[in-house]
Image: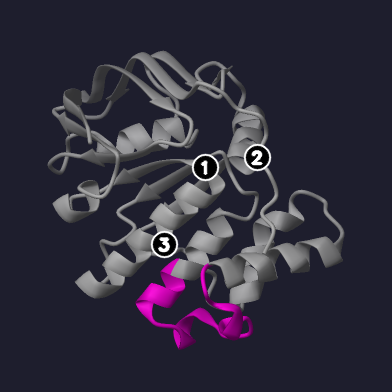
Amino acid sequence: MEVEPLLSLAGVMIQLQQVSKVFDGKRQVTALDHVSLSVSKGEMVAITGPSGSGKSTLLNLIGGLDKPTSGEILLDGESLSQVSDDELTRVRRDKIGFIFQFFNLLPALTCLENVVLPLHLRGWPRKKIDERARELLELVELSHRLDHLPEELSGGERQRVAIARALSIYPPVLLADEPTGNLDSQTGAEILKLIQRLNERLNSTVLVVTHDMGVSGTCTRTIRLRDGRIVEDARR
Protein backbone atom coordinates (compact mmCIF):
# COMPACT_ATOMS: atom_id res chain seq x y z
CA MET A 1 0.00 0.00 0.00
CA GLU A 2 1.36 3.43 -0.92
CA VAL A 3 1.26 5.89 1.97
CA GLU A 4 0.36 9.47 1.14
CA PRO A 5 3.26 11.78 2.09
CA LEU A 6 2.91 14.16 4.99
CA LEU A 7 3.15 17.89 4.70
CA SER A 8 6.69 19.23 4.78
CA LEU A 9 7.39 19.59 8.49
CA ALA A 10 10.74 20.40 10.02
CA GLY A 11 12.22 20.80 13.47
CA VAL A 12 9.99 21.18 16.50
CA MET A 13 6.46 19.81 16.09
CA ILE A 14 5.15 20.52 19.61
CA GLN A 15 6.29 23.30 21.91
CA LEU A 16 4.97 24.32 25.32
CA GLN A 17 6.20 27.54 26.91
CA GLN A 18 5.49 27.97 30.64
CA VAL A 19 2.09 26.29 30.34
CA SER A 20 -0.17 26.09 33.40
CA LYS A 21 -3.68 24.70 33.79
CA VAL A 22 -5.74 25.56 36.85
CA PHE A 23 -9.20 24.12 37.52
CA ASP A 24 -11.55 26.19 39.66
CA GLY A 25 -14.07 24.51 41.92
CA LYS A 26 -14.69 24.40 45.63
CA ARG A 27 -10.94 24.61 45.77
CA GLN A 28 -8.42 25.51 43.10
CA VAL A 29 -6.44 22.62 41.59
CA THR A 30 -3.26 23.20 39.59
CA ALA A 31 -3.06 20.33 37.10
CA LEU A 32 -0.03 21.69 35.24
CA ASP A 33 2.46 24.15 36.71
CA HIS A 34 4.64 26.17 34.30
CA VAL A 35 5.56 23.29 32.01
CA SER A 36 7.97 23.95 29.14
CA LEU A 37 8.59 21.21 26.59
CA SER A 38 9.67 20.69 22.97
CA VAL A 39 8.99 17.56 20.91
CA SER A 40 10.55 17.11 17.48
CA LYS A 41 8.95 15.69 14.37
CA GLY A 42 8.94 11.89 14.37
CA GLU A 43 9.69 11.41 18.07
CA MET A 44 7.83 8.72 20.03
CA VAL A 45 7.48 10.01 23.58
CA ALA A 46 6.04 8.34 26.68
CA ILE A 47 4.42 10.56 29.31
CA THR A 48 4.44 8.86 32.70
CA GLY A 49 3.73 9.65 36.33
CA PRO A 50 1.30 8.77 39.13
CA SER A 51 -2.44 9.43 38.94
CA GLY A 52 -3.13 13.13 39.26
CA SER A 53 0.31 14.16 38.02
CA GLY A 54 -1.10 16.00 34.98
CA LYS A 55 -0.53 13.45 32.19
CA SER A 56 -4.00 13.50 30.66
CA THR A 57 -4.29 17.26 31.14
CA LEU A 58 -1.06 17.70 29.18
CA LEU A 59 -2.33 15.47 26.37
CA ASN A 60 -5.68 17.29 26.24
CA LEU A 61 -3.97 20.67 25.96
CA ILE A 62 -1.65 19.50 23.19
CA GLY A 63 -4.64 17.95 21.41
CA GLY A 64 -6.64 21.17 21.56
CA LEU A 65 -9.36 19.57 23.70
CA ASP A 66 -8.76 22.23 26.35
CA LYS A 67 -6.97 25.56 26.65
CA PRO A 68 -4.24 26.49 29.14
CA THR A 69 -4.83 28.98 31.94
CA SER A 70 -1.52 30.61 31.03
CA GLY A 71 1.43 29.98 28.75
CA GLU A 72 1.77 29.19 25.06
CA ILE A 73 1.27 25.97 23.08
CA LEU A 74 2.54 25.70 19.51
CA LEU A 75 1.67 22.84 17.17
CA ASP A 76 3.68 22.85 13.96
CA GLY A 77 4.38 26.54 14.57
CA GLU A 78 0.71 27.41 15.09
CA SER A 79 -0.44 28.78 18.45
CA LEU A 80 -3.29 26.88 20.10
CA SER A 81 -3.58 29.11 23.14
CA GLN A 82 -5.50 32.07 21.75
CA VAL A 83 -7.39 30.67 18.76
CA SER A 84 -11.16 30.28 18.50
CA ASP A 85 -13.00 27.02 19.14
CA ASP A 86 -13.62 26.72 15.39
CA GLU A 87 -9.90 27.00 14.72
CA LEU A 88 -9.15 24.35 17.36
CA THR A 89 -11.67 22.06 15.66
CA ARG A 90 -9.84 22.58 12.36
CA VAL A 91 -6.46 21.77 13.94
CA ARG A 92 -7.82 18.58 15.52
CA ARG A 93 -9.41 17.56 12.23
CA ASP A 94 -6.35 18.21 10.07
CA LYS A 95 -3.32 17.53 12.27
CA ILE A 96 -4.12 15.29 15.26
CA GLY A 97 -5.13 11.66 15.65
CA PHE A 98 -6.45 10.45 19.01
CA ILE A 99 -6.31 6.92 20.44
CA PHE A 100 -8.18 6.31 23.69
CA GLN A 101 -8.11 3.53 26.26
CA PHE A 102 -11.76 2.59 25.75
CA PHE A 103 -11.74 2.68 21.92
CA ASN A 104 -14.76 5.06 21.55
CA LEU A 105 -16.11 3.18 18.54
CA LEU A 106 -19.75 3.66 17.57
CA PRO A 107 -21.40 0.29 18.30
CA ALA A 108 -23.97 0.46 15.49
CA LEU A 109 -21.34 1.02 12.79
CA THR A 110 -19.09 -1.56 11.16
CA CYS A 111 -15.30 -1.33 11.26
CA LEU A 112 -15.27 0.31 7.84
CA GLU A 113 -18.00 2.78 8.79
CA ASN A 114 -16.22 3.77 12.02
CA VAL A 115 -13.05 4.56 10.06
CA VAL A 116 -14.76 6.53 7.26
CA LEU A 117 -16.66 8.75 9.70
CA PRO A 118 -13.97 11.43 10.19
CA LEU A 119 -13.14 11.37 6.49
CA HIS A 120 -16.62 12.59 5.55
CA LEU A 121 -15.79 15.86 7.33
CA ARG A 122 -13.09 16.52 4.72
CA GLY A 123 -15.58 16.59 1.85
CA TRP A 124 -13.79 13.93 -0.17
CA PRO A 125 -15.55 11.89 -2.89
CA ARG A 126 -17.15 8.73 -1.54
CA LYS A 127 -14.85 6.50 -3.61
CA LYS A 128 -11.70 8.13 -2.19
CA ILE A 129 -13.06 7.86 1.36
CA ASP A 130 -13.84 4.17 0.93
CA GLU A 131 -10.41 3.46 -0.57
CA ARG A 132 -8.59 5.28 2.25
CA ALA A 133 -10.57 3.45 4.96
CA ARG A 134 -9.88 0.06 3.38
CA GLU A 135 -6.17 0.89 3.11
CA LEU A 136 -6.04 1.85 6.78
CA LEU A 137 -7.78 -1.31 7.92
CA GLU A 138 -5.32 -3.28 5.81
CA LEU A 139 -2.49 -1.32 7.45
CA VAL A 140 -3.65 -2.47 10.90
CA GLU A 141 -4.21 -6.00 9.60
CA LEU A 142 -8.02 -5.98 9.75
CA SER A 143 -8.96 -6.14 6.08
CA HIS A 144 -10.90 -9.33 6.87
CA ARG A 145 -13.10 -7.51 9.42
CA LEU A 146 -14.51 -4.66 7.32
CA ASP A 147 -18.17 -5.50 7.86
CA HIS A 148 -17.96 -6.59 11.51
CA LEU A 149 -19.50 -4.57 14.34
CA PRO A 150 -17.34 -3.65 17.37
CA GLU A 151 -19.15 -6.21 19.57
CA GLU A 152 -17.96 -8.93 17.20
CA LEU A 153 -14.30 -8.01 17.73
CA SER A 154 -11.77 -8.75 20.43
CA GLY A 155 -10.39 -5.90 22.54
CA GLY A 156 -7.20 -5.83 20.51
CA GLU A 157 -9.12 -5.73 17.24
CA ARG A 158 -11.27 -2.85 18.51
CA GLN A 159 -8.15 -0.92 19.39
CA ARG A 160 -6.77 -1.58 15.90
CA VAL A 161 -9.95 -0.10 14.41
CA ALA A 162 -9.56 2.91 16.70
CA ILE A 163 -5.97 3.32 15.49
CA ALA A 164 -7.07 3.11 11.85
CA ARG A 165 -9.66 5.81 12.53
CA ALA A 166 -7.04 8.00 14.25
CA LEU A 167 -4.77 7.64 11.21
CA SER A 168 -7.48 8.52 8.69
CA ILE A 169 -5.72 11.76 7.69
CA TYR A 170 -2.20 10.41 8.31
CA PRO A 171 -1.89 13.03 11.07
CA PRO A 172 1.42 14.73 11.83
CA VAL A 173 0.65 14.18 15.54
CA LEU A 174 -0.76 11.03 17.15
CA LEU A 175 -1.88 11.23 20.80
CA ALA A 176 -2.55 8.00 22.70
CA ASP A 177 -4.07 7.99 26.20
CA GLU A 178 -3.38 4.62 27.87
CA PRO A 179 -3.82 2.76 24.55
CA THR A 180 -2.97 -0.61 26.14
CA GLY A 181 -4.58 0.00 29.54
CA ASN A 182 -7.77 -1.94 28.76
CA LEU A 183 -6.01 -4.92 27.17
CA ASP A 184 -4.24 -8.04 28.41
CA SER A 185 -0.46 -7.91 28.39
CA GLN A 186 0.05 -9.89 25.18
CA THR A 187 -2.53 -7.90 23.20
CA GLY A 188 -1.19 -4.67 24.66
CA ALA A 189 2.30 -5.56 23.47
CA GLU A 190 0.96 -6.22 19.96
CA ILE A 191 -0.83 -2.85 19.88
CA LEU A 192 2.32 -1.09 21.06
CA LYS A 193 4.38 -2.74 18.32
CA LEU A 194 1.77 -1.61 15.81
CA ILE A 195 2.01 2.00 17.02
CA GLN A 196 5.81 1.78 16.78
CA ARG A 197 5.64 0.51 13.19
CA LEU A 198 3.24 3.29 12.24
CA ASN A 199 5.50 5.87 13.88
CA GLU A 200 8.41 4.60 11.78
CA ARG A 201 6.41 4.28 8.58
CA LEU A 202 4.45 7.55 8.68
CA ASN A 203 6.98 9.59 10.71
CA SER A 204 4.16 10.98 12.85
CA THR A 205 5.07 12.50 16.19
CA VAL A 206 3.61 10.16 18.83
CA LEU A 207 2.87 10.96 22.49
CA VAL A 208 1.73 8.06 24.68
CA VAL A 209 0.32 8.58 28.18
CA THR A 210 0.90 5.41 30.18
CA HIS A 211 1.27 3.91 33.66
CA ASP A 212 3.02 0.89 32.14
CA MET A 213 6.80 1.09 32.37
CA GLY A 214 7.02 -1.58 29.69
CA VAL A 215 5.28 0.79 27.29
CA SER A 216 7.52 3.73 28.18
CA GLY A 217 10.60 1.53 27.77
CA THR A 218 9.86 1.10 24.07
CA CYS A 219 9.66 4.84 23.38
CA THR A 220 12.68 6.89 22.37
CA ARG A 221 12.01 9.42 25.13
CA THR A 222 10.23 9.38 28.49
CA ILE A 223 8.85 12.44 30.26
CA ARG A 224 7.83 11.90 33.88
CA LEU A 225 5.40 14.22 35.63
CA ARG A 226 4.71 14.75 39.31
CA ASP A 227 2.35 17.33 40.80
CA GLY A 228 1.95 19.01 37.44
CA ARG A 229 5.66 19.47 36.77
CA ILE A 230 8.25 17.67 34.67
CA VAL A 231 10.62 15.88 37.04
CA GLU A 232 12.48 13.81 34.44
CA ASP A 233 13.08 13.99 30.70
CA ALA A 234 15.16 11.03 29.51
CA ARG A 235 16.11 9.91 26.01
CA ARG A 236 17.16 6.39 25.05
**Image quadrant where one finds the C terminus:** top left
The quadrant holding residue 90 is top right
Please give left or right for residue 165 compared with residue 37 in the image: right
Circles 2 and 1: CB atoms closer than 8 Å: yes
Residue 174 is situated, as x and y percent measured from the top left of the image, at 48, 44
Residue 38 sits inside the magenta stretch: no
Return the residue nearer the eye: 38 or 49.
Answer: 38
Say which element carries label 2. Answer: loop
Whole-angstrom CA distance, mark 3 to mark 1, is: 13 Å
Q: Is residue 183 above or below residue 77?
A: below
> Tag on residue 6?
2
Where's residue 219, x and y in %?
Answer: 29, 44
Q: Residue at x 40, y 21 (%)?
A: 68
Name the foreground residue: 225 vs 85.
225
Frontmost residue, 203 versus 167? 203
Q: Is 204 rendered above or below residue 68?
A: below
Which mark sits nearer the N-terminus, 2 or 1? 2
Instruction: Quote the CA–CA distance across marks 3 and 2.
Output: 19 Å
Identified by mark 1, the residue type is Asn
Q: Which circle marks residue 70 in the picture?
A: none
- In the foreground, 12 or 165: 12
Magenta part of the chain: 140-159
Rendered residue at 39%/82% (across/down): 154
| Residue for badge 3 | 194
Residue where numbered disc 1 is placed: 203
Number of other residues with Cα within 10 Å of mark 3, as a class: few under 14, some 14 to 19, many 20 or more: some
Q: Amino acid at mark 2?
A: Leu
Q: Position of residue 186 (x, y in %)?
A: 24, 73
